[in-house]
Amino acid sequence: MVARTSKERKVWYIDYLFTTGNAFKELKLFNFESFLKIQYEKLKKIIITQDIKIAKKYANNSLLFTTFDLISSFGLYVYIGYKTFSSIILIGDMTTYINGIDSVKNSVSSCIQAASNITRNSFYLSLLFKFLDQDNQNTTVGNDIRKKTITSIETIELKNVSYKYLGSSDYAIKNVSFVLKKGSVLGIIGKNGSGKSTLIKIILGFYKNYDGTVLVNSKDLRDIDSYSYQKQISAVFQDFIKYEFSLKDNVMISDISKYNEEDKFINSIKDVGLNDYIHNHDMILGKWFEGTDLSIGQWQKVAIARSIFKDCSMLIMDEADASLDVISQKEIYKLIAKIYTNKIGIFVSHKVISTGKIASEILVLKKGEVVEYGSSEKLAENHKHYFEMLEADMDYN
Ligand SMILES: Nc1ncnc2c1ncn2[C@@H]1O[C@H](COP(=O)(O)OP(=O)(O)OP(=O)(O)O)[C@@H](O)[C@H]1O
Ligand SMILES: [Mg+2]
């Protein structure tokens, strides 16, 4: 029964991942629907099989009971009839006979009810299997044949991009323009609410209704097949997901086609220093399924390991360093700098000094607008927005 409850909770958890907004970004970028679907199928089949067994057992029992009830009622009827006609009992005793008829009726209706239960459950089961057997052709997975597919990202260019959230009168992003080439790293800094994460979501192709143009390899992002584009991108989101799966699944879901590449997984967790304290890679993380919960910084390392496990042309980190201790930050910065060398990098952080070291160009956002853009050295000399934030970071540290 405990095992059954745990399976039901897992099914509920997969439902939750599929249907809540937060997981949607990672689900779309890492494209691991099929992985979740397989888990869902397995668990649901076990549960449905159990339900059918229980229903059949119940139906058999109730069939047995009603048959017995029917025969005994009928026997009673014959017996009463014989006694009445033989004048052994009075006509008034016919009440018993009527009760007997009622009893027969009730029994027959129970029988029909039990039979319909079996039919209904079988029908639900066949519908479920039909649903689970559908291939991915009708889902978001797969290329859109009307659009251009790409196999790498060489350049990203934004031309006067503006964006307003639905229902909001203010621009979250206003007239943003810049060019990024392979090997360059854009550091985005700005106060809370300045539009950093929104800009990232536009670049990722999550928001379509922006003004202006986003060019990928000089082609309009709107004309590019989003599946092939997002296949080339990996990211750590500011609100990354702590999957209640094993460490292995947590990391490998960013590219399930490489699920069996154990060495690649080991390298990813070694790179972020997770192997120092997690030795059992199949251990379930989190607390929903009696797993081992991690600190927020350790979870952040899991998210970073997940992002680097996926081969990509562009790696986006949105405050991926927010909860790391100073030693880990140093290690992660070294790692990111190394990974960024042959990619397009986008690095969002409130650690201005470190961002200056990692990024080749810095973009300072204020209320959605670019107020400064250039190398960290150049911006430091400007003594304006970047300089002010740099000084604040220096004073603090
Ligand atoms: N889903 C949303 N719906 C409506 N408005 C939003 C939404 N997400 C963000 N905003 C608004 O857009 C603006 C920019 O938000 P964004 O999350 O991009 O800021 P940020 O620079 O990433 O901030 P932080 O440093 O806190 O992460 C804010 O004013 C915010 O209130
Ligand atoms: Mg943000």
Image (cartoon, helix red, strand yellow):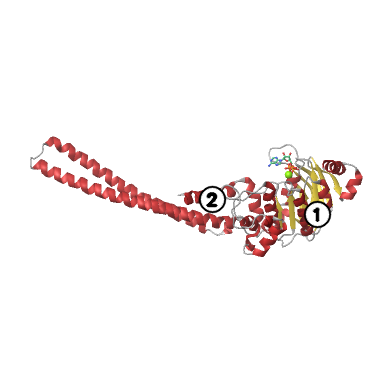
Q: Quadrant of residue 307?
A: bottom right
What type is the residue that disc 2 sits on? Lys
Quadrant of the displayed image that contains ligand 1 = top right
Which label is found at residue 10? 2
Q: Quadrant of residue 283?
A: bottom right
Which residue occupies the foreground of this view, 371 or 290?
290
Which residue is disc 1 drawn over? Answer: 185
What type is the residue that disc 1 sits on? Val
The residue at the point 24 percent across, 44 percent down is 104
Q: Is residue 231 left or right of residue 13?
A: right
Q: Where is residue 113 in the image (x, y as percent from the top left)?
A: 34, 47
Crowding at mark 2 (Cα within 10 Å: few <14, some 14-19, many 20+) = many
Q: Position of residue 234 (x, y in %)?
A: 71, 55
Crowding at mark 1 (Cα within 10 Å: few <14, some 14-19, many 20+) = many
The residue at the point 75 percent across, 37 percent down is 170
Which label is found at residue 106? none
Q: Can residue 197 be seen by looking at this rendering?
A: yes
Measure the alpha-carbon separation of dots 1 and 2.
Answer: 40 Å
Given this view, does label 1 or label 2 mark the residue nearer the observer? 2
Q: In this view, does 126 lie to the left or right of 374?
A: left
The residue at the point 46 percent across, 53 percent down is 47
Q: Which residue lies furthest to the left in this view?
A: 87
Q: Mark 1 vs mark 2: which is more N-terminal?
A: 2
Residue at disc 1, secondary structure: strand
Q: Position of residue 175 (x, y in %)?
A: 80, 45
Residue at disc 2, secondary structure: helix
Q: Can residue 148 be seen by looking at this rendering?
A: no
Q: Where is residue 198 in the image (x, y as percent from the top left)?
A: 73, 45
